[in-house]
């Protein structure tokens, strides 16, 4: 089959040229992909279809973190887990003020989504956070290190295990 395709039907009937739809920058702006929804960019998932992850109670942090990161990605709040606050509006520019206000509002929502994802015993410990990034980093520091320590402890116990030959450890009744 030839790599070039002639497009001459449907909404692109006026576009009658030989193109390879997968080569070059044209595929995003004209040709056979012009009227196809979601042809360019990520496919969006409605936030209402994604369930909130279970509350974090201090164990299985890695799994909880992964689920929360996906949850924030769907809500389009994942960037607030890594971003520092915007620069202050020294020039009193109304556009900068509006952008800053939106950033702080979304940061506030992100903080509260994280806090709502914590068990009742952990909530008051982290409730005073002002930035989502600081809250996220403090949880990472505390519980990722703890997960590593727990794994090291378990591995150490396994390595310390000694077997005794010819000794019955369990009697079957």
Image (cartoon, rainbow, N blue to C red):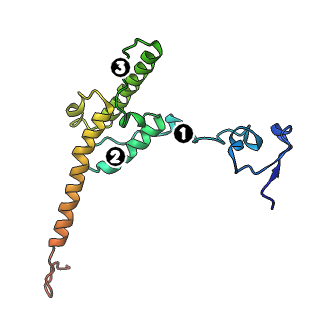
Task: List the residue tagged with mark 3.
Answer: 88
Q: Which residue is mark 1?
A: 45
Whether residue 6 can be seen here? yes
Relative image position of residue 131 (x, y in whole percent): 30, 29
The residue that mark 2 highlights is 64
Answer with left or right where residue 10 lies relative to residue 172. Answer: right
Q: Earlier in the sequence, mark 2 or mark 1?
A: 1
Cα separation between marks 1 and 3: 33 Å
- Expressed as whole percent of the image width and height from the top left, the position of residue 102 reads 43, 21
Tell whether 33 sits left or right of 45. Answer: right
Q: Secondary structure beneath disc 3?
A: loop
Of residues 51 and 19, which is closer to you in this image? 19
Q: Earlier in the sequence, mark 3 or mark 2?
A: 2
Badge 3 vs badge 2, beta-carbon distance below 8 Å: no
Q: Specify the farthest residue to the bottom.
A: 166
Q: What's the distance in space between the residues labelled 2 and 1, CA to CA?
A: 20 Å
Q: What whole-number distance in Å separates the C-alpha atoms at marks 3 and 2?
A: 34 Å
């Amino acid at each position: 089959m030839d790599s070039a395709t002639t497009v001459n039907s449907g909404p692109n009937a006026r576009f009658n040229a030989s193109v390879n739809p997968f080569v070059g920058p044209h595929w995003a702006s004209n040709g056979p992909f012009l009227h196809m929804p979601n042809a360019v960019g990520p496919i969006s998932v409605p936030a209402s279809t994604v369930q909130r992850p279970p509350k974090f109670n201090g164990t299985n942090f890695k799994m909880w973190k992964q689920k929360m990161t996906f949850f924030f990605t769907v809500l389009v709040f994942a960037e607030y887990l890594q971003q520092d606050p915007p620069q202050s509006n020294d020039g009193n520019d109304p556009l900068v003020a509006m952008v800053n206000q939106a950033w702080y509002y979304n940061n506030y929502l992100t903080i509260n989504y994280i806090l709502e994802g914590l068990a009742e015993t952990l909530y008051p410990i982290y409730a005073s956070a002002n930035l989502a990034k600081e809250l996220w980093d403090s949880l990472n520091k505390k519980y990722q290190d703890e997960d590593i320590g727990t794994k090291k402890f378990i591995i150490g116990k396994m390595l310390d295990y000694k077997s005794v030959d010819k000794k019955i450890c369990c009697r079957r009744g």
